[in-house]
Amino acid sequence: MYINITDNKAADNKGSCGPLVNYLEKENRTGAQETLERWFNHIDQSYEDYEVRRTIDSNIAKLGKDDAKFFLINISPSQKELTHLEEKYGADKISEMLKKYTVKVMDEYARNFNRNGIKSSHDLVWFAKLENNRYYTYNDKEVKNGTRRRGELKQGDQRHVQVIVSRKDLTNKIKLSPMNSSRGRNIEHSKKMGQFDRMTFKQCGETLFDREFGFERGLKDTIAYANIRKNGTLEQRIQLDTLEAGTALNEDPNNETLAIVHDISKEMFGSSAEMLETMGSTIGKFLDIMLEPIYDTEGSTIPNEPRRKKKKKGRYKDQSRQIGM
């Protein structure tokens, strides 16, 4: 599940939301009448574009001309997730399930601020639009290598949801910015903006999808896995290598593996040995895995098959001491 909040540096969100609303109406302008998608939220599913624009634009009390007035949230399920919804509910129910899911994602968005009076999507001013298509952009590798052209329609089920949420709450009194990165460290700033943690929000959306729809997510399909591979420290990548190698040998429930990778992403472990010790009785065959990854001559990690650690006589009395337990 890809969930992203557009950074205000890249979004024109300091004025009216009209241009954005107009852009997100593009499929309604080109599609047939029976395929029109109206705007929705936790109250209704049939808002017109002018209602969205008027409501968001009027909810800006005490915001300056250079302040963000709204934020855009992109909720994009993967092909695996869409296929799962189709198999479980049928093709004609996918859109309905995504809309219900969006409401719950916005509940998580509200709770993530940790602000008094902001407990669910009912305390926010927001509207969402289900889109059925995606188009290739200059950032896509297919466009870069010349196999596709910019603006060309992408194949397959491309359903996703775009959410416009007001900077101010329903009372038009509380400022809420998901771009605040203090996470409670700056007390005065957090009182004004909340303590929003964008990574926690994204992981909540992923966990919510799995729980609501019974989706069995693989380790490599998690946000935490992708984030560690892209932005993690060397120690986090070593721990992930150990976890990934052990998953192929161990028979513990997949949920345990997903919980551990989330903890790795939060830097909960000082070493792989500490990670294995934390897993306790679910360690299983993880204990036999070599903790150190293999590196090539340039210092890059080489993907390796799970390897057994060779025992040396007299070095360890038992296996538990081998990992410092």
Image (cartoon, rainbow, N blue to C red):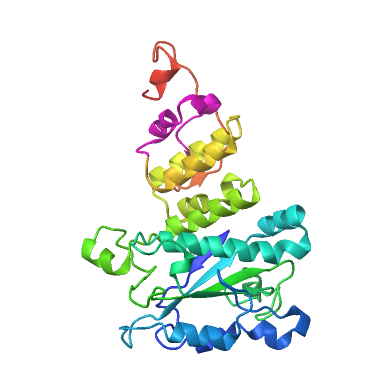
Q: Is residue 248 left or right of residue 295?
A: right
Task: Residue 12 in the image: state x and y as whole percent.
Answer: 44, 84
Q: Nearer the viewer, residue 295 or 164?
A: 164
Quick check: can you spot residue 20? no
Tell me the chief SS of the magenta region.
Answer: helix
Q: Nearer the viewer, residue 244 or 160?
A: 160
Seen at 32% across and 59% down, the residue is: 183
Seen at 50% across and 66% down, the residue is: 4
Q: Is residue 59 magenta?
A: no
For the N terminus, the image quarter is: bottom right
Of all residues shown, which one is farthest toward the left? 188
Quick check: can you spot residue 223? yes
Task: Residue 236 in the image: state x and y as whole percent.
Answer: 41, 45
For the C terminus, the image quarter is: top left
Seen at 39% across and 64% down, the residue is: 118
Seen at 34% across and 82% down, the residue is: 67
Task: Residue 44 in the image: state x and y as whole percent.
Answer: 60, 73
What is the span of residues highlighted in magenta in the rendered image?
A: 269-293
Residue 307: image quadrant is top right
Residue 140: image quadrant is bottom right
Q: Is residue 283 magenta?
A: yes
Figure check: 261 above or below 39: above
Task: Residue 315 in the image: state x and y as whole percent.
Answer: 39, 15
Figure check: 222 above or below 24: above
